[in-house]
Amino acid sequence: MFDSHSFYKKRLTSHVKDLSRYLRYIFNGHIAFAMLFFIAALAYYYQQWLAQLPEDFPTAWVMGIVFGLIASYSPVRTLLKEPDLVFLLPAENKMGSYFRNSIIYSFVIQIYLVVLLFAAFGPLYFESFPGREGSTYLLTLIVLFIFKIWNLLANWWMLKVRDASIRYTDQIARLLLNIAVFYFLVYGEMLLAGITTVLFIVVFLYDFFLSRKQAGIAWELLIEKDRNRSQTFYRFANLFTDVPHLKTPIKKRHWLVSLISKRVPFDYKNTFDYLYRISFIRSGDYLGMYVRLIIIGGLFIYFIPNIWMKLAFALLFLYLSSFQMMTLYNHHRTIMWLDIYPVTAEMRQKALIKWLIQLIMIQTVLYSFIFLVAQEYYGVVMVLVGGFVFNYLFINGYVKRKLA
């Protein structure tokens, strides 16, 4: 007899084992060091910023929007796979325990983000509202947990609705109501917070009755949602190690490929020069990660007041970009026909090193331009010199040894 509870335990065990295997590669020594540096620097400047907090700072709006987004983002991880569409369909009426466990697991794994943001906003809350007690802020956490559960249930009910436009409309309505509730709650307007809560409950009950009218389970939608979330995680993990079952999206980007590849000489010695460049451009991972790291690092450099911390963040993001782009070397490892290329391993390594040097120097020049815009002329010289020194040390001290 089919036991959906036991089946879920096996599926969850397999999922956790798969997850932990990749997390070991993601949170290695390099990333742990970078995260420690980030947290320490952000905590220091957060404290400095709070000491000079403007009286008219819109704390209620900021916290209301962030808490509203966190409450609204409550996806349900069902851990379903594509073969389940065939093999579990006959047992649809016995899947109650399975989906109940899925909802509980989804809530548990999202608690950490709620607690993290609650702790991060605590100093801002008490600095903006010095006359309030800790129990008032604790009430906000309790309400946030309640709304998190409600949104999780509403999202699950709406997954039975096959009309995408209805689901999107419902998500937008609940998001606006969530933001309104937490804005009024933080601002201290308890009456208005209560009214918007009643409105949310109306939408919540509407979702429940709408789901009851749906015939059966939308298996295709559930599998698609879970597959997309799994692929998102695998794409991130692929930046640190090879993920064999990753379905990497390929984007043509003809004009960018033409701009990069036309500078590569047409010669067998430049085979991997060409391959690494078009893989960097067309893959769904590398170019986006590179650009995001440049933008995030640039924001830190521009807004942080201390010039030495600016330089430290510049070098940190140069390191992060270089470390992430190194995975290009193994990007085509599973393609066996590349081994028939009349190209030595030394040429392949030189091609990657040359491309990494160019990427690091482009990022260094962009960061020096940010220093120039911020009128930190001494910083322009320091980041250029620091970038050149980092380039030399990282390539010769780490990359070549790693590739060998």
Image (tube, rainbow, N blue to C red):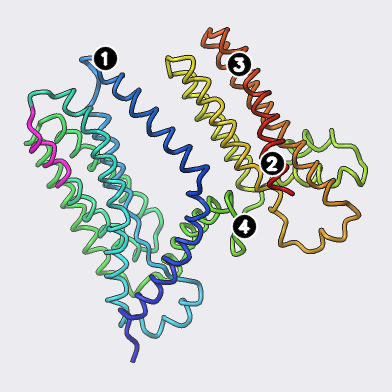
Whether residue 25 sits left or right of residue 44 in the image: it is right
Kind of residue sitting beneath label 3: Phe
Measure the C-alpha gap from mark 3 to mark 2.
27 Å
Counting residues from the start of the chain, the first of labels 4 and 3 encountered is 4
Q: The disc labelled 2 sits on which kind of residue?
A: Val
Q: Residue at x 57, y 40 (%)?
A: 289
Label 4 sits on what residue type?
Answer: Asp
How many marks overall? Answer: 4
Q: Quadrant of the N terminus?
A: bottom left
Q: In this view, does 359 lie to the left or right of 289?
A: right
Q: Which of label 2 and label 1 is nearer to you?
A: 2
- Which segment is the magenta one? 132-142
Distance CA(mark 2)–CA(mark 1): 43 Å
Residue at numbered disc 4: 242
Residue located beneath label 2 in the image: 399
Q: Distance between the residues labelled 1 and 3?
A: 28 Å
The answer to if 40 sits in the magenta stretch is no
Residue 123 position by quadrant: top left
